[in-house]
Amino acid sequence: MSVTPSYLAVLGFALWNSGYRQGTTGQSLGKQVMGTKLVSARTGAPIGFNPAFVRQIAHVIDALPFYLGYFRPLWDARRQTFADPVCDTVVVHAGS
């Protein structure tokens, strides 16, 4: 298997959007469109690259079992997926 430029481009975009952009501004492109941002549950500030990257990996927890973690915000008081308490994050309205 060879690594093609398109794989590298997709990986680069994912790292930029989910790690750098979301970690430094609180907003991935999708969160910007939706008017939300990711912040630390304790400080309310953007969480930085490393925690944002780890949170993306922690979303594996949300997929087990049957993607139930992605439905958790429907009944959770803080509207968090399973990955959010693990990473001490919360998604809020961008104006907050």
Image (tube, grey):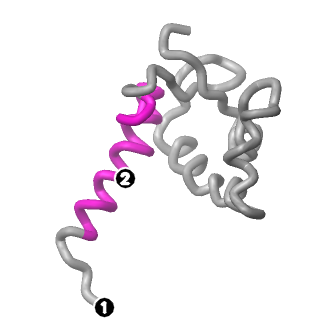
SS at circle 1: loop
Name the mark on residue 77. Answer: none
SS at circle 2: helix
Farthest top residue in view: 95
At label 2, counting other C-alpha atoms closer than 10 Å, the crowd grade (few under 14, some 14-19, many 20 or more) is some
Relative image position of residue 61 (x, y in whole percent)? 71, 57
Q: Nearer the viewer, residue 73 or 16?
A: 73
Give the tally of numbered discs.
Answer: 2
Q: Earlier in the sequence, mark 2 or mark 1?
A: 1
Relative image position of residue 53 (x, y in whole percent)? 51, 49
Farthest bottom residue in view: 1
Horizontally, residue 35 falls left or right of residue 7, namely right
Q: Is residue 35 above or below residue 90?
A: above
- Looking at the rendered image, the quarter that the N terminus falls into is bottom left
Relative image position of residue 66 (x, y in whole percent)? 73, 62
Q: Are marks 2 and 1 in contact (CB under 8 Å)?
A: no
Locate residue 71: give its quadrant.
top right
Name the amino acid type tagged 1: Met
Q: Main secondary structure of the magenta part?
A: helix
| Residue range of the region highlighted in magenta in the rendering | 7-31
Q: Is residue 57 above or below residue 18?
A: below
Residue located 56% across and 9% down the image: 96
Q: Is residue 63 above or below residue 49?
A: below
Residue tagged 1 = 1
Residue tagged 2 = 14
Relative image position of residue 35 (x, y in whole percent)? 45, 20
Name the amino acid type tagged 2: Ala
Locate residue 81: give its quadrant.
top right
**Residue 75 included in the magenta stretch of the image:** no
Horizontally, residue 62 falls left or right of residue 18, namely right
**Residue 24 included in the magenta stretch of the image:** yes
Residue located 61% across and 17% down the image: 44
